[in-house]
């Protein structure tokens, strides 16, 4: 099965948004040769212009909250566009999760016309992500936007309880 077909299957289960997005991240980690970490960040419903870590696959990261404008993730949230960083050591506005990471891609996720989060992938190889990967991840961002909105709704409920 090709990766897009597997991703479609991963989000079509009857379980919750955390499980679906977790499966998506695990698939990216497993099936993209250059991917060494994959995760979703969500626009924090309880704090303006803040991202909060959602489902991910790979090593835990200290960057659970990222302010808009900070790091590659925060830049993508402010600029509302995809960032491909071929060499993270040459990027002055970068938040390091691990010294092993050499390149990164961040793709914004929009739902009903607003930014609700991002897909973030790290690679231990320089120039690990191509424009082809960017196109596939853009497709995936659209595919999973509704599921990420459901995940965000769960965060809102938690924040209110
Ligand atoms: N490198 C990111 C931080 C998130 S980690 O990659 C998981 C950044 O610069 O925003």
Image: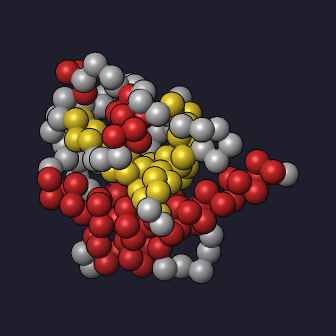
Quarter-wise, where is residue 19 in the image?
bottom right
Residue sitting at x 76%, y 57%:
157
**Quick check: can you spot residue 98?**
no
Q: Farthest residue toward the right? A: 161
Quarter of the picture holding the N terminus:
bottom left
**Quick check: can you spot residue 77?**
yes
Residue sitting at x 61%, y 57%:
152
Residue 155 x/y as whole percent: 68, 53
User: How many callouts does the rendering have?
Assistant: 0
Task: Classify 9 as above or below 118.
Answer: below
22 lies left or right of 151: left
Residue sitting at x 15%, y 39%:
127
154 lies left or right of 30: right
Task: Classify 147 as above or below 48.
Answer: below
Residue 24 x/y as whole percent: 43, 63
Residue sitting at x 51%, y 31%:
67
Color theme of the render: secondary structure
Q: Farthest residue toward the front? A: 113
Quarter-wise, where is residue 138 in the image?
bottom left
Quarter-wise, where is residue 85 in the image?
top left
14 lies left or right of 111: right
Task: Classify 96 as above or below 141.
Answer: above
Q: Nearer the viewer, residue 29 or 93?
A: 93
Q: Nearer the viewer, residue 2 or 86?
A: 86
Task: Classify 157 as above or below 79.
Answer: below
Residue 115 x/y as whole percent: 46, 53
């Amino acid at each position: 099965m090709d990766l897009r077909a597997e991703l479609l299957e991963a989000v079509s289960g009857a379980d919750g948004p955390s499980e679906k997005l977790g499966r998506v991240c695990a698939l990216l980690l497993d099936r993209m040769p250059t991917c060494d970490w994959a995760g979703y960040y969500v626009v924090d419903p309880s704090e303006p212009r803040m991202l909060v870590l959602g489902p991910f696959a790979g090593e835990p990261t200290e960057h659970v909250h990222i302010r808009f404008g900070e790091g590659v993730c925060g830049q993508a949230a402010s600029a509302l566009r995809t960032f491909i960083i071929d060499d993270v050591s040459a990027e002055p506005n970068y938040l390091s999760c691990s010294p092993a990471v050499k390149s990164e891609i961040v793709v914004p996720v929009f739902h009903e016309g607003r930014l609700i989060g991002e897909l973030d992938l790290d690679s231990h190889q320089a120039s690990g992500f191509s424009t082809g990967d960017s196109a596939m991840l853009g497709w995936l961002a659209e595919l999973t936007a509704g599921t990420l909105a459901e995940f965000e709704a769960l965060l809102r409920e938690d924040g209110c309880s």
